[in-house]
Amino acid sequence: MNEHELRAVADVGEGFSSTAKDYDRGVRFNIAGGQRLVMSLPDGDHRRVLDVGCGTGLASLAMMARFHPDHVTGVDTSRGMLDEFAAKLHQSDAQVEVELKQADVLHMGIAPGTYDAVVSTMAFHWFPDKAGATRAMGDALRPGGVLGVLCSGRHAEHEFREVLARVDHPGVAVWDAVFDAVQRDIPEMEEYVRGAGLEPLDIWMERRIRRVPPAEYLERMRVVTRHLFQAQFNDDEIADLHARTAAEMHAAAGADGFEYTFTKLYAIARKPA
């Protein structure tokens, strides 16, 4: 990784640490998406599970509920998110060995071929090197093991980008550009998977029209995009950006709330036996 990529990884970790306690409340749709991903994995004896970009443990907990693994390793760049995951484990009665590691996907320190299943839920789009990340996750799989990825799909949230176009703030350009940087389509994901030496089992997108109160939408944005601004803007400037955006969103909202398109991209693949 070059210096710019290393800084980007650090910014993501720091940003999510600052909003970790609010994450689950702000991303309720992501929770359902993670469960959908786990339920889409093929049946198998997945005794050892690796969760990359594990966050607060949403996918890991779903894997525990479905497959009852003996061991789960959660990897994330955010110390705050790992702390939230650890707190959930402390309150649960899950009979599973869990290891939590603060690390980037390209530097996980994972022995090759040691996991039966690898999952990554709503983190993949933040990885600077997506092809390299897919190879790293594939390398961790044993022959016959499965990979499941959930990330942002193409052609989503154009309604919010239209709102941003009416906001007068230097942070708008940063916010708008990230949509093109993170969103991916089915052919791109298939290329990543095949490039990692994996066999695609199913890759698909789900497109939904959602209507939520503007405050709920902006809370989700706050908890997942803090890292975009913290290197360039101070807290007051970020607060001003959110206030200006909130005013435009309320103006754009209808009787049923703010309507927007959301697209999730799912991928299930297997490592050849």
Image (cartoon, rainbow, N blue to C red):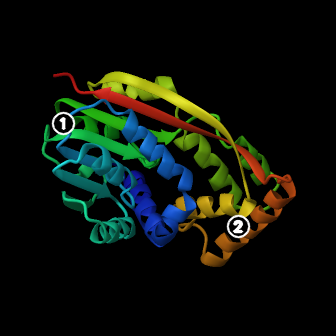
Q: Look at the image and tell me in which quarter the C terminus lies.
A: top left
| Tag count | 2
The residue type indicated by label 1 comes to Asp
- Residue 110 location, x and y as percent? 17, 48
Give the side of residue 252 with respect to residue 93, left or right. right
Q: Which element type, helix, strand or loop, lies under badge 1?
A: loop
Residue 113, image quadrant: top left
Seen at 80% across and 52% down, the residue is 256
Q: Which element type, helix, strand or loop, lies under badge 2?
A: helix
- Residue 175 location, x and y as percent? 64, 54
Q: Which residue is mark 2?
A: 242
Give the side of residue 206 with respect to residue 55, left or right. right
Q: Residues within 10 Å of mark 1 (few under 14, many from 20)?
A: few
Against 262, residue 98 (above or below) is below
Q: Nearer the viewer, residue 188 or 255?
A: 255
**Disc number for residue 45:** 1
Q: Nearer the viewer, mark 2 or mark 1?
A: 1
